[in-house]
Image (cartoon, rainbow, N blue to C red):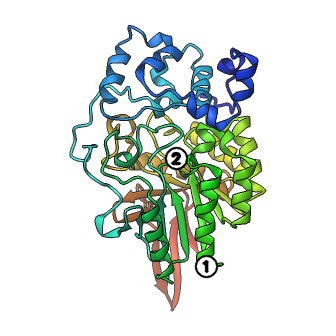
Amino acid sequence: MNITVTAGAETRQQLPMSENVAWTSWKWQQQNAITNVEALVNVFPELKDSPLLARISERLDGRKLGITPYYADLIRSGINGQPIDKDPLWLQVVPAWTDASTGELSYDGETDNWELPHEMVTPICQHKYDNRVIIRVSNICHAYCQFCYEALRTLETETDKGKFRKSDWAATLDYIASHPELDEAIVSGGEPLMHADAQLRAMLEDLRALRPELVIRLHTRALSFNPFRVTDELLAALRETRVTAVGLHVAHPREITPEFIAAVAKLRQAVPLLFANIPLLAGVNDELDVMKPLCLALYRHGVLPHYLYQFMPFSPGDTQFCTDISKGVAIIKQMKRRISNMAVPELVLPHRTGKYSVPLSLSGESPKLEVRDGREFVTFRNWKDELCVFPG
């Protein structure tokens, strides 16, 4: 399989000039997003009279659908006569898997898999790790990943997860101010960039006013779904509030388009550190010849691949997306030392109690530490799978 990093332009080229100009407006993209089955059929007419349509409707019962025109164009341009239900971009945003999830660890619409009750110090603020909190400032997204581990917050049309309220924000600021052990505040969602620039700036200014040394990090998938969201006003807010890092969520090389790359270049002028978190998804990126070009494309343009996430229990689509843990290990091992180590993400298990870094020796011979004549020696297998001893 050969992966190329390109952008589609079929939909854009068919637009009248006035709408073609509007194409680069992030608000236009959101206002014209596909949000129901009827709109999906209008953009993908091959779905009409297809068995896929009934499955999609069934899976969407009580859940959200959202696809920006920009992302729909990437899907359309990548099909090239192949079955649409095999396209890796389509799979991420349209729930068309055959088997319903019914296993013990399947999504049940009720079970939280990450936000343990005692960690939620306010309705929008989670304190899981010692020195940082994550703040859920939005329950909505530019488009909806149908495998989202925050599905109870983002995908359900009826949710118990509270929407952003000023009183909860004030309580969150008070909590951070009263806990000096906190070094970092992570602004996430849903999608934090669904807030307008002025609203987001106000939040970032509130956080920066707490402590000058506070690390502020922001997570987004805007660059995959709506890269036009990186406006001059947003860049000014990030720069002037001294946001430390922006984490990009990305899953496939075809998401690394010229528009994505241009948005990255702008962010690099405003934020010191850009990194990427990647979900490991069967049928999307669980092959070396997909993961390797994805990681290299990110690294090439100044984004460090950070985490490769094993599929999380109690998330939608587990029969579609869940891979063996050993498959993720094998992919990372095949990339390790064969490409720059900074381009190789760390494989993690996102357990409800916290992330666990998976050792690459999980499926093979473990490193062994021995003491000989008062000196430590480690026996290990190198990147060529050769048995080695250090020092030696």
Q: Is residue 298 visible?
A: yes
Left or right of 388 in this view: 7: right
Disc nearer the start of the sequence (2/1): 1
Q: Quadrant of the C terminus?
A: bottom right
Toward the viewer: 276 or 142? 142
Q: How far is the residue under mark 2 from the one under mark 1?
A: 41 Å
Task: Name the residue rendered at 57%, 31% in the picture.
Answer: 31
Name which quarter of the figure residue 52 lies in.
top left
In the image, residue 92 lies at what x, y percent? Answer: 47, 34
The crowd level at tag 2 (other Cα within 10 Å; few <14, some 14-19, many 20+) is many
- Identify the residue at the far bottom of this view: 374
Toward the viewer: 310 or 354? 354
Q: Which mark is residue 328?
A: none
- The amino acid on which the numbered mark 1 sits, given as a three-letter code, is Arg
Mark 2 or mark 1: which is in front? Answer: 1
**Figure check: 84 above or below 294:** above
Q: Quadrant of the N terminus?
A: top right
In the image, residue 278 lies at what x, y percent? Answer: 53, 48
- Identify the residue at the far top of this view: 49
- The amino acid on which the numbered mark 2 sits, given as a three-letter code, is Ile
Q: Secondary structure at mark 2?
A: helix
Q: Secondary structure at mark 1?
A: loop
**Figure check: 233 above or below 82:** below
Q: Which residue is mark 1?
A: 211
Q: Is residue 305 visible?
A: no
